[in-house]
């Protein structure tokens, strides 16, 4: 029993370490967000916003920068390198990809008629994982294969653990008055 718990804890720690740039990009976009929306308030052909007011340049740039800084710090912590080592490209792709995934999600939310901030269960929680993984796979396939594809257990842990973590950070963000909704 103890061994199982220790193994699960080990998987969560390793998964969080590898995903940290992406995990930080998402909530820091909320902190830095505001100002001009990426779609410049323009509508799509269906008369609805392209992305909506929830996707701004400051959020995208601030969030990406925070994820990248986190990754650069992680590269310096030699004592934790056994959890996984990063490349410059993987750090950028994880951070930017997370917010790109979030933005593409918003595009489809608007097409489906969901208002900005409307709840879209599971998609709201895994959009940035999908974005981070796809972009990292596209730009640094070797890193992605070594760190994720080679360890399906790590990938499964990310998919199961992220929604829990996301829910928790959004509740904190809501009570800290950073977010309008607790999801
Ligand atoms: N944010 C931002 N720019 C981004 C991503 C997020 O400015 N690229 C900020 C916005 O203030 C946004 C908040 O972070 O309202 C929360 O992000 P998210 O939940 O992804 O957006 P929603 O407002 O819920 O909009 P959507 O319905 O499009 O998901
Ligand atoms: Mg939201």
Image (cartoon, grey):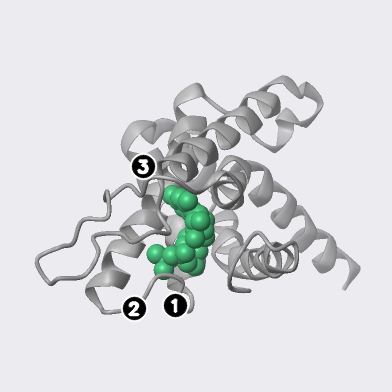
Q: Which x, y percent locates residue 92? A: 47, 31
- Secondary-structure class at tag 1: loop
Where disc 3 sits, the SS reads helix
Query: Residue 181, how many percent across, how many down?
Result: 59, 73
Residue 17, placed above or below residue 164: above
Ranked by sequence position, the earlier of labels 3 and 2 is 2
- Where residue 128 appears, as percent x and y from the top left, is 46, 55
For residue 105, the mark is: none
CB of mark 2 near ligand 1 (< 8 Å): yes
Residue 82 in the figure: left or right of residue 32: right
Residue 106 in view: yes
CA distance for labels 2 and 1:
6 Å
Q: Which mark identifies residue 118?
A: 1
Q: Nearer the viewer, mark 3 or mark 1?
A: 1
| Residue 160 sits in quarter | bottom right
Is the CB of mark 1 within 8 Å of ligand 1? yes
Q: Residues within 10 Å of mark 2 (few under 14, many from 20)?
A: some
The image quadrant of residue 52 is bottom left
Q: Can you tell which mark lies on residue 114?
A: 2
The residue at 75%/62% (across/down) is: 176
Residue 105, given in percent of the width and then of the height, sits at: 35, 63
Image disc number at residue 135 = 3
Residue 68 or residue 60, whichever sits in front: 60
Q: CA distance from mark 3 to mark 2?
A: 26 Å
Q: Residue at x 58, y 40 (%)?
A: 21
Cα distance between the residues tagged 3 and 1: 26 Å
Q: Secondary structure at mark 2?
A: loop
Name the residue at 41% across, 32% down.
142
């Amino acid at each position: 029993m103890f061994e199982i718990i220790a193994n699960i804890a080990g998987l969560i720690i390793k998964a969080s370490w590898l995903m940290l740039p992406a995990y930080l990009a998402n909530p820091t976009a909320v902190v830095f967000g505001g100002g001009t929306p990426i779609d410049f308030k323009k509508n799509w052909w269906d008369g609805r916003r392209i992305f909506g007011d929830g996707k701004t340049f400051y959020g995208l740039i601030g969030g990406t920068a925070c994820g990248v800084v986190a990754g650069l710090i992680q590269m310096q912590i030699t004592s934790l390198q056994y959890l996984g080592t990063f490349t410059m490209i993987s750090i950028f792709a994880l951070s930017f990809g997370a917010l790109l995934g979030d933005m593409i999600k918003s595009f489809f939310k608007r097409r489906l008629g969901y208002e900005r901030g409307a709840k879209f269960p599971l998609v709201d929680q895994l959009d940035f994982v999908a974005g981070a993984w796809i972009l990292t796979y596209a730009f640094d396939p070797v890193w992605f294969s070594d760190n994720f594809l080679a360890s399906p257990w790590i990938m499964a842990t990310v998919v199961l653990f992220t929604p829990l973590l996301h829910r928790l950070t959004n509740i904190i963000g809501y009570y800290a008055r950073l977010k309008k909704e607790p999801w």
